[in-house]
Amino acid sequence: MKLFKAILLLFIFISPLKANTIYNLIKIPNLEIYEIKTKNKLKYFFAASSFRLGVKKNIVCLNPSKEDLDLKYKTIYKNLDKYSYSYLKKINLKYIVLCENLSISGINTAGIPDNVMKTLILDINFNENFFERVIHHEVFHIINDQYNELFEKTEWIKFNNSKFKYAECSTCTEKLGLETYKNTKGFFSEYSKSTASEDMAEVYSHMIFLSQKDINKIKKKDPVLNKKISYIENKIKEIDNSFTF
Amino acid sequence: MIKKIKPSKSEKIILIFLILLGSITFGTFFIIKNKCLFVKKYDPKNINFKNPTNIAVLNVPCGNVIIELYPEISPNGVNRFKKLIRSNAYDNVAFHRVIKDKLVQAGDLEFGKKGNLNYGKIGTGKSGLGTIKSEIDNVFNYTKGSVGLARSFKNDTEDSQFFIILQDEPLYEGEYTPLGKVLYGLKALKKIKSQRHSEYILRPDFINSFKMLK
């Protein structure tokens, strides 16, 4: 019992100092270190208690349970470990924040990328079926924000059928399904049809997640996706020539 | 014959009170007021260094702080730092940002000089030498006493401001350009004036001098 009290006291005395440092670095309150000694130097934090962000405090995320955190961390680490330190440096991603039930203005979301703060906030309770792929989807948003001028939306739109129109924004549509289509017809998922940047993120995440064999099959079968895949591949090569999908 | 008079109980209490009051007054004026009283003084002349060309001596109100610089980890950063030290640019510059037992920061050459302090702009001043690129790829453990170059919100904005951490800060690795580590005199840094509710210091302590040993 005494040992427990001593550890608890040590935890109380140490934690706020660490939390202050984290806040100074990425401006998110109530975080603590989960893991910082990683091969690609990504630093993982978790929400020790819930936090609110944004000018209107409209971004909300809750603190996860230790069991959930330990379980999901392994999956997240496995996926993000695919990226080298040099690649992460180029795309400006350094910090991963793990929390639960992430939402913006009441709308649940898998992740919130912030390339300025080099941070990706991930909801560890996001739909199990798509969780791993969605991690890469959010990584693409970091890349897109960092190299905004590289990913030309007008050029991208031309790949689609001329009659097709994206929605005004990703939340201005009901097209939110993340299930991968069996018959792709130019789009990997329903969510791909929401906006050009979500479409790009879906293509990127599938390129990371699916095997090269499956990607080659899709490229042969679907001429629109063939163009989109080649486009993303070339742009990523421009950022880091050594990167392989 | 003089008759011995025994002091009454209340007289004894007054006497004890006066002794206590005297002790507190003495303590306040001569012990507590002197914040440097228990700080060990280091003279670099009495210490042997492996590489004296990388030793810098920072003199602060409570004595010398002896720093070893690591040009092999951050060649450009250390080069800039040495250049500024050799030109005595840091002399009489304020420790404008101090977080008690955590960090001291100085080196604003434009708005942090003694006699020319600008409280509205301190922390934003430049050296006139331009900014340098961040050197954050090499392995460096930001343990207590580590010295690093401060920067603005963005990378590659390092100039003349530097900080010394007073506790381990593992998250600083890969974030700030390391310059070196304090070998002796960390306690003198812990005595630098801080404020309870603000990181930025009103009437701050100053660097007396900052010199390279050789």
Image (cartoon, helix red, strand yellow):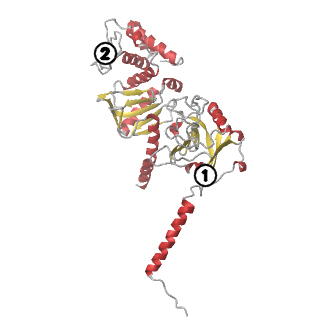
Q: Chain of mark 2?
A: A
Q: What is the number of callouts on the image? A: 2
The disc labelled 1 sits on which kind of residue? Answer: Cys
Note whether A42 is above or below A245 in the view shown. Answer: below
Mark 2 surroundings within 10 Å by alpha-carbon count, few (fewer than 14), some (14 through 19), many (20 or more): some
Query: Residue furthest toward the bottom?
Result: B1
Q: Quadrant of residue B58?
A: top right
> What secondary structure is marked by label 1?
loop
Residue A184 in view of the camera: yes
Left or right of B11? Residue B47 is right
Of A28 and A187, nearer the camera is A28
- Return the x and y of residue B148 as percentages of the image width and height: 57, 38
> What secondary structure is marked by label 2?
loop
Mark 1 surroundings within 10 Å by alpha-carbon count, few (fewer than 14), some (14 through 19), many (20 or more): many
Q: Are marks 1 and 2 in contact (CB under 8 Å)?
A: no
- Asked whether the residues under marks 1 and 2 belong to the same chain, the reply is no
Note whether A200 is above or below B50 in the view shown. Answer: above
- Return the x and y of residue A141 as percentages of the image width and height: 41, 22
The residue to which callout 1 is attached is B62
Q: Chain of mark 1?
A: B
Quarter of the image with the N terminus of chain A in it: bottom left
